[in-house]
Amino acid sequence: MSTNSEVIVGEGASKVLFSNTAGLSLIAGPCQMESRDHAFMIAGVLRELCGKLGIGLVYKSSFDKANRTSLSGKRGMGLEKSMEVFADLKKEFGFPVLTDIHTEEQCAIVAETVDILQIPAFLSRQTDLLVAAAKTGRVINVKKGQFLAPWDMKNVLAKLNGSGNPNVLLCERGASFGYNTLVSDMRSLPIMAAMGAPVIFDATHSVQQPGGQGGSTGGERRFVETLARAAVAVGVAGVFVETHEDPDNAPSDGPNMVYLKDMPQLLEKLLAFDAIAKA
């Protein structure tokens, strides 16, 4: 089975198109689901903003941060409670939602509610997880492992397509460079696009410094816009941006996340670059 060069997720007026040649779409939300009220607050701001800008929105949040640096790191609300919140968000706002899965058993459970199953970068070569996710029939967003070359993603894509799922997004989130550092090779975007799948650029995880604060992950938020602008100028189907009203006090990935108040200016700039790239 081949992959689809255009992936549509969601229904009705809120459906979102991901295509390397169509207008930019957005995957955004807080790193982890902290509470129902917090999720609704962030979702409401993003929905209003994307409506004004005419950009497709997929809301993301993690029910479990299973790869925290420290055993004491906060991991999120958990599977059952988070699925209830995702269902309520979809009912209230209509947009599709995305979350990470970490085990084969989670795939079918999460797929009952969530529109896009995300394969974390560290798990991008785990064949059994990829097969289980693919067989749900949901759209799959697979993050390129920090340890993989972009051309290695053809094998990951083949596992998903070969398991009966053509609706796959390939996501760039940086490559390991020495200790506690990631770099983004913009060549990876057209290389992965040539495989036939829509490409997503994860602007916030690309500025991570894994384990860079000793007991937690650091990051350089000031470079999110720089990398996002570069990726959109190259041409991508969508950008992935984690955002929070108070990232410096967020329970996870605070150093990477964009202030919610800064999202309008960031998106306006990215849409301008996107228009030029795809003119």
Image (spheres, helix red, strand yellow):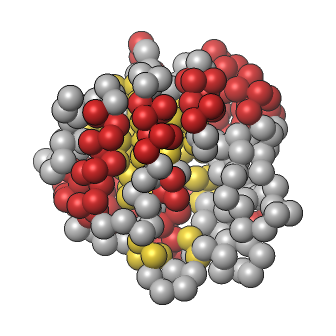
Q: Quadrant of residue 12?
A: top left
Q: Is residue 235 left or right of residue 218?
A: left
Between 254 and 133, which is closer to the camera in this rendering?
133
Q: Is there any visible trace of residue 13 in the rendered image? A: yes
Q: Is residue 121 above or below residue 1?
A: below
Image mark count: 0
Residue depicted at x 70% and y 40%: 63
Q: Is residue 142 left or right of residue 216?
A: left
Q: Is residue 99 above or below residue 174?
A: above
Between 88 and 66, which is closer to the camera in this rendering?
66
Q: Is there any visible trace of residue 261 in the rendered image? A: no
Q: Is residue 60 above or below residue 68?
A: above
Residue that protrudes farthest toward the front in the picture: 128
Please provide percent x and percent y for residue 257. 62, 60
Q: Is residue 193 above or below residue 175?
A: above
Please provide percent x and percent y for residue 157. 30, 44
Residue depicted at x 70% and y 51%: 65
Between 185 and 17, which is closer to the camera in this rendering?
185
Residue depicted at x 44% and y 67%: 146
Between 171 and 270, which is closer to the camera in this rendering?
171
Please provide percent x and percent y for residue 141. 43, 41
Please provide percent x and percent y for residue 277. 19, 54
Quadrant containing the N terminus is top left
Residue depicted at x 78% and y 46%: 76
Residue that protrudes farthest toward the right in the picture: 72
Q: Quadrant of residue 15?
A: top left
Q: Is residue 262 left or right of residue 195?
A: right
